[in-house]
Structures are given as structure tokens and as C-alpha cells.
Image (spheres, rainbow, N blue to C red):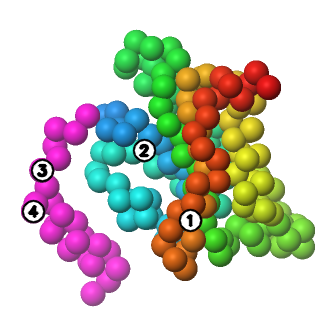
Amino acid sequence: MTDNTAILERNNRFADRFEAADLPILPKLGTLILTCIDARVDPAHVLGLELGDAVVLRNNGGRVTPAVIDEIATLAFMVGKMTGNPDPEFNVVLMQHTQCGAQNFANPEFRHALQGKLGIDVSNSAIFDQETDLERDIDRLADAPGIPDGLKVSALLYDVETGRAREIVSPRKLAALRTR
């Protein structure tokens, strides 16, 4: 049995009991979650999400990168067009986790080796101190053009050993962060 065979068998079981054909395109919880690609950090499991509850973006470290800013700006624009509200209100939850491989990106030797070998710059994904980095990522969103004022942003840190997520930054409107 190949990995794909196992995955497709699981999908068949899912499809056999599928009852969500009428889900709306916009998430039921009005939430976008940005988290790491680490297989131990699946927001559906960690946060008890159901299909259609939230939009999930994943990258190395769950960091706010230029690509993530573009994705969020595009989503906000689309939501604004669909709802008729050019400044849509929805939640953005940034969730990093303990024991993250992106902590290796903080090592200058590792970063330079990766840049030299593959030409990839991971400086925007490096995790130095998760609490500080989460706050810095919120600032990146607040400073980004194209991200609407109505978005609320918060940050969580998920512990892969205990299964608990801890709030690092409570929800804050970007508009309030931009006036400081």
C-alpha cells in the first residue's frame, strides 16, 4: 500500500459520510489562522475546527511573510467584494508552536548555507523568540498596505508536548495598532 492509497482510502471514508456540500465560501467563524506546516500542528485538531470554520494558511514557522501579507490582502479584498464592505471585519489568528524547525533558521550558519545551496532566504521565517516574533508579525500586518483596518489580530503559542494553546496577544483591531 502506498501513502497515496492510504490517503485516498481515508478520503473515501470521508466522502461516504460527507454532508457539507452547502457550506458557504466564507468561513463560519470569520477567522483566518496562520500556522506552521509542521504535521504536529494541524489547526483542525489542535483548535477543534470543523470543515468550513476557518481559512488556514501554513508556512515554515507560521510567520507573516510578504507572501502571507499578499494572501491576507487578497482574501480581505475578496471578502470586501462579496459582502459589499471594503473594510471587512474578520479575525486573523497567528499560531506558532514549541519545538519548531524554523528555529533553525535563526542560526546564521544554517541560513547562509541554505541561501548558498538553494538560493532561498528564510530570514522572514526565522524564529528567534516566539512571543517577540508573534508580536513582530502583528506589527508586520499593521504596517502592511492593503490590509484593512477592520481585521482583528491575535497570537497563540501551541505546546506540542501538552496539546495546549496559550494566548500571547489578545485580539486587537489593526486600526488601533496603526494609531500608536
What whole-number distance in Å separates the C-alpha atoms at marks 1 and 4?
Answer: 32 Å
Q: Is residue 48 above or below residue 23?
A: below
Q: Amino acid at mark 2?
A: Val
Q: Secondary structure at mark 1?
A: strand
Position of the N terminus, as image quadrant, is bottom left
What whole-number distance in Å separates the C-alpha atoms at marks 3 and 4?
Answer: 9 Å
Instruction: Tell me if mark 4 has few (under 14), some (14-19) or many (20+) residues whose alpha carbon lies within 10 angstroms of its own.
Output: few
Q: Amino acid at mark 3?
A: Glu
Which mark is on residue 18? none
Count of all numbered marks drawn on residues in the image: 4
Please give the residue where the numbered disc 3 appears in the rendered image.
19
Q: Is residue 22 above or below residue 177?
A: below
- Is 11 magenta? The answer is yes
Q: Position of residue 59 (x, y in %)?
A: 59, 56
Q: Nearer the viewer, mark 1 or mark 4?
A: 1
Seen from the viewer's position, the closer of residues 70 and 175 is: 175
Which mark is on residue 158? 1
Q: Position of residue 104 (x, y in %)?
A: 77, 72
Q: Which residues are the magenta region?
A: 1-24
Lower position in the chain sequence, tag 1 or tag 4: 4
Please give the residue where the numbered disc 4 appears in the rendered image.
16
Lower position in the chain sequence, tag 2 or tag 3: 3
* For residue 133, side relative to residue 21 (left or right): right
What whole-number distance in Å separates the C-alpha atoms at marks 3 and 1?
Answer: 30 Å
Q: Amino acid at mark 4?
A: Asp
Q: Amino acid at mark 1?
A: Tyr
Q: Position of residue 132 (x, y in %)?
A: 78, 54
Position of the C terminus, as image quadrant, is top right
Please give the residue where the numbered disc 2 appears in the rendered image.
55
Residues at circles 2 and 3 in contact by the CB criterion of under 8 Å = no
* For residue 147, side relative to residue 118 (left or right): left
